[in-house]
Amino acid sequence: MMARSRRSMHHFALPFLAAFVVLGLTILLQAQAASSPAKLSVHWEELTAADFRQGIERSQGTCLLPFGILEKHGPHLPLGTDLLDVRYTALHAAEQEYAVVFPEYYFGQIAEAKHEPGTMAYSRGLQLALLQETTDEMGRNGCKKILIVNGHGGNNSLLPFFAQTQLDKPHDYVVYVFDERTPETGGPPKKTKIDMHAGESETSKMMISHPDLVHMDRATSESGADQARQKIPEDVYTGIWWYTRFPNHYSGEGSAANKELGEYQMKWWIDSVVKAIRAVKADDVSLKLQNEFYEKAKHPLDTQP
Ligand SMILES: [Zn+2]
């Protein structure tokens, strides 16, 4: 008797219970959808066409172009070190301050490593032409503020030159360049003095972004010491300077790397890119004055002091 009545109560209550659960879930999901908009990927290539439109709107037309390279990185780091690290940084920064991040780009200046295996060194004209067409196409797609995040030291003359030449003819977007990767001070004390390429800092950063690609046991198999073979004053520049000092395409001691330094430097780099994205978004001067400049440049004799 008891058992039968309990069973009949179950038969009676279950449909109601199920209906309540379904109703409750529906309300919960609707509330969630209303309070937080759908998550948009920061990766250009992962967005649908419609989501891309939303991404451009959400980023206020701010897009990142992380710029890497393919070159030897000492005996212990992968060829794509600069590409892998700059993308790790830019993607983490864009997650914090939304921006659309352009896919893998590594068509920069690296003539000085053509003697090493795996280097992809595009010619001077193509580097500039490809970068211009890339930013032009980004601009045509609504990226009115393009922040190039440079991950490769060999691009440090190319990128300001590229930005300067944006003034030669009108563009309806602004090119910004962010070219810092390593804090000058702060964090765990560094053990080495020379630390330019695949050395203590760069190896430490890779230990954070891609630890599985660091072959620490090989870090001392080649020398990253400064060979100081060129005897000309420091203020006289030559393209061969790097090879005269670091013919192994290795500058510093990767073996001095450690995770603590990597964590500090990676966080500093990501934070710096976040700050740069915010500054670029807030900049309402550059495009306006760039347009004024293009207009005046058409008839310089009318420019009044
Ligand atoms: Zn590098």
Image (cartoon, grey):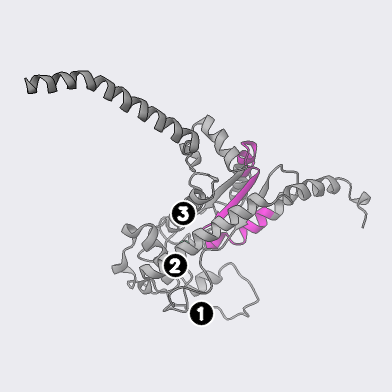
Task: Kindly state the secondary structure of the residue where label 1 is placed.
Answer: loop
50 vs 163, left or right, is left
Q: Up-down: is 274 above or below 36?
A: below
Amino acid carrying mark 2 in the image: Tyr
Q: Which residue is mark 1?
A: 228
Residue 264's disc number: 2
Residue 83's disc number: 3
Crowd band around label 3 with a 10 angstrom C-alpha radius: few (<14), some (14–19), many (20+) = many
- Say which residue appears at 67% left-offset and 54% top-offset: 163
Amino acid carrying mark 3 in the image: Leu
Mark 2 vs mark 1: in front: 2
- Say which residue appears at 40% left-offset and 67% top-offset: 204
Q: Are marks 2 and 1 in contact (CB under 8 Å)?
A: no
Residue range highlighted in magenta: 135-163
Report the front residue among 218 and 32. Answer: 32
Mark 3 vs mark 2: in front: 2
43 vs 126, left or right, is left
Report the front residue among 17 and 231. Answer: 17
| Residue projecting furthest to the front | 1
Earlier along the polypeptide chain: callout 2 or callout 1? 1
